[in-house]
Image (tube, helix red, strand yellow):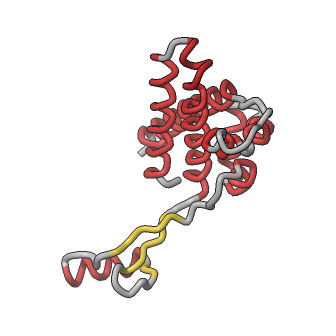
Amino acid sequence: MTDQIRRHADKYAEAAILIEEHATESDKRFGLSIPITNLSVLAIELYLKSCSGDYDLFHAKSGQKLTNDQLDACKMVLGTTPAHIKHSSAPRGHKLTELWKHVPERQRRAISDYRSGIAEDLERLEGVFQQSRYFYEKANSKVMPSGLAFDLAQDLYKFFAKSTALNSSSK
């Protein structure tokens, strides 16, 4: 799992929590449900990407892919590593069901055990990220599942916090 992607997901989930906690019901009905939904679905997307991606390192000047062995050798010989750039290998795009397919099976089972019905929830949320961002472009009668997005984002937030704590304590 790429911790940096997970930390970004946490921040989006936390922002959704802050808005949800401080908004009145009237605010949520008339406008704030869209940013809460957008933040929640983006958090979900990033949590899924954090499970299946890692970083590849590339030499900053040549663009050549670097291995950890090459970086270690440079550090040993030169006392420093060459300037390098990180690129995530996490799957691209916003299709939650496709991102779910890239999550390793063991992790999918663990998440499903924590939140039953997640695959179906992801199907129901398919396209909501785009819909919540571009709601003004065309009339759309589809109701955004704001509550589902928020609840799932919060469950993933708790799941990954718990998983991170368990991993930290086992080291």
Instruction: List x then y, in percent, for residue 33.
Output: 60, 26
Where is 13 relative to 65, above or below?
A: above
Residue ID at (56%, 48%)? 46
Instruction: List x then y, in percent, for residue 112.
Output: 72, 37
Q: Quadrant of residue 61?
A: bottom left
Spot the residue most to the top: 25
Nearer to me, 89 or 114: 89
Is 169 on the left-hand or right-hand side of 88? left
Nearer to me, 27 or 136: 136
Spot the residue most to the left: 79
Is 79 on the left-hand or right-hand side of 130? left
Residue ID at (29%, 76%)? 83
Instruction: List x then y, in percent, for residue 77.
Output: 22, 84
Instruction: List x then y, in percent, for residue 145.
Output: 72, 29
Nearer to me, 28 or 123: 28
Residue ID at (45%, 45%)? 8
Is 147 on the left-hand or right-hand side of 28? right
Spot the residue most to the bottom: 62
Q: Quadrant of residue 30?
A: top right
